[in-house]
Amino acid sequence: MNKENIVFIFPRGEAIKNFVLSGTAQEVRKSYRLVIYSVFPNEEFKKLLEDNCEEFHPLPSTQKDYLIDWTKGQLNMSHGKWLWSGAAKMRWALRDKESKSLKDKVKRLSNKFVASFFANKLGLQFLENRLIKLYIKKWSNGFFEQEFKRLKPVLVFNASHIHCEDAYPVMYIANKLGLKTVTFLYSWDNLTSQGRIIPSYNHYMVWNDQIKKDLLTIYPKINSSQVTVTGTPQFDFHFKKEKIWSKEEYFNKIGADPNRPIILYTTGMLNLMPYEEMIVAEYADYLLTLPNKPQLVVRVYPKDKSNRYEQLKKERKDIIFPHIPWETKFLTPLPEDSDLLTNMLYHCDIGVNVASTVTLELAIFHKSTINIGFNPPNVDISPLDYSIYYSWDHYKPITDSNCFYLAKSFEDLKRFTLQGLKNPLEKSKNQDNLVKSFFGSTLDGKAYKRVADCLINLAGSN
């Protein structure tokens, strides 16, 4: 008996990690014939994708279209103005600051006027409908319409609802043809920090109950039965005990001294954490003054292409910068990075970051955690402010959980470092409470299977 087709769309490299390396694809293949359309950075990844489906095709790049891009930009801007979350306010202020010339200021003022006019439910719906017409007009009878007519898939799954320019035409055509469409909300902050979810889907998978609640509030046309809480496969890798290296193996791999503590500093995004390298350098100076000489291991944010840490890498041999195995093309984590990240978290004594998802991951491992809530010294980064992120919609529950130390000054950072080294489990109970409230029963290393089960059940339902 021939199996029916399910189609996976991978518009970004991280989706390959989440839904192929995790095991989701193989689970789906037990019941359906899997067809994957994906970006891929190199031939090794092409082979990996081919080995995990019955039919693989490169995901075509989207051709630029001024009217579509303008309408989509106005929709996202209007959505941000309507939502007016902390992240939306910050983005609004940043775009104002970036408009320096008279021409840019006039253009910015015009876009703000249009966005404010459409920043309501009727306005947003109008822009969405306009975008649907534009996409259908441009992409009808094209490659994917022909492919879907050939494959007759019972379900089309977009593995990343955001940052997916190449996936938009695919999903609009899938909707036009009346195919069942599903997406996964890529990250816990996306609802309040990114643009509007386009196009609409028949079903949504999310990390936790709070994200489901937020999704239903922001998009009232979606009903509860259209949303499934699965957890996130990106954390599944932390529960594979066979992937944990011995202390000696880990320290040897990164070139560290096994007799000294390790402090893991995970850096953030350039556009939100400018001049963070200054904090890293000053912190490294301080650690050298401590009797037990803690080693600073810096995991540079893999998507940071600025090379702003290159000077520190050359000049500061006391700071350990492990190679982060990502392909820059399509921002794709290599399979070995999952093991590296898990071991960096597992073997550190303290974790330091600026309002990062890593705080959640450190809580899983009961690691003493410090969040940076002060700005780099002697530079003006306004309207950015490191302290603001802790009150943003998605992060405030983490802040309120008291599962980490919030350093509001460099003196705080020094004090909390000593405190964390002396009493590493001081926040462990709060971390347990956070993990339980945030993830419920989904933090068990089996989110990949829940995603697959959800897709299989949806594909089989009428």
Image (cartoon, grey):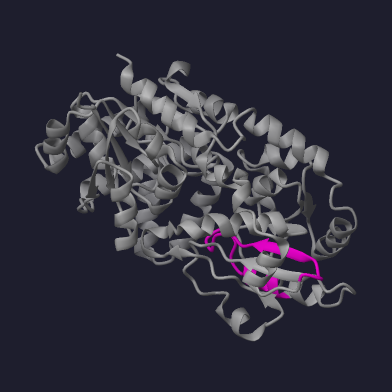
Q: Residue at x 60, y 50 (%)?
A: 242
Q: Is residue 113 visible?
A: yes
Q: Could you tell me which quadrant the N terminus lies in?
A: top left
Please tell me whether residue 34 is drawn above or below residue 102 in the rendered image. Answer: above
Q: Residue at x 24, y 46 (%)?
A: 56
Q: Position of residue 28 (x, y in %)?
A: 36, 32
Magenta span contains residue 77: no
Tell me the magenta residue range: 258-281
Q: Residue at x 56, y 42 (%)?
A: 236
Question: With 445 as the anchor, is 326 left or right in this view?
Answer: left
Please tell me whether residue 223 is drawn above or below residue 377 in the rendered image. Answer: above
Q: Position of residue 387 (x, y in %)?
A: 70, 53
Q: Position of residue 101 (x, y in %)?
A: 39, 67
Magenta span contains residue 265: yes
Q: Is residue 356 visible?
A: no
Question: With 244 as the anchor, is 144 left or right in this view?
Answer: left
Q: Residue at x 46, y 37 (%)?
A: 185
Please tell me whether residue 107 is drawn above or below residue 222 in the rendered image. Answer: below
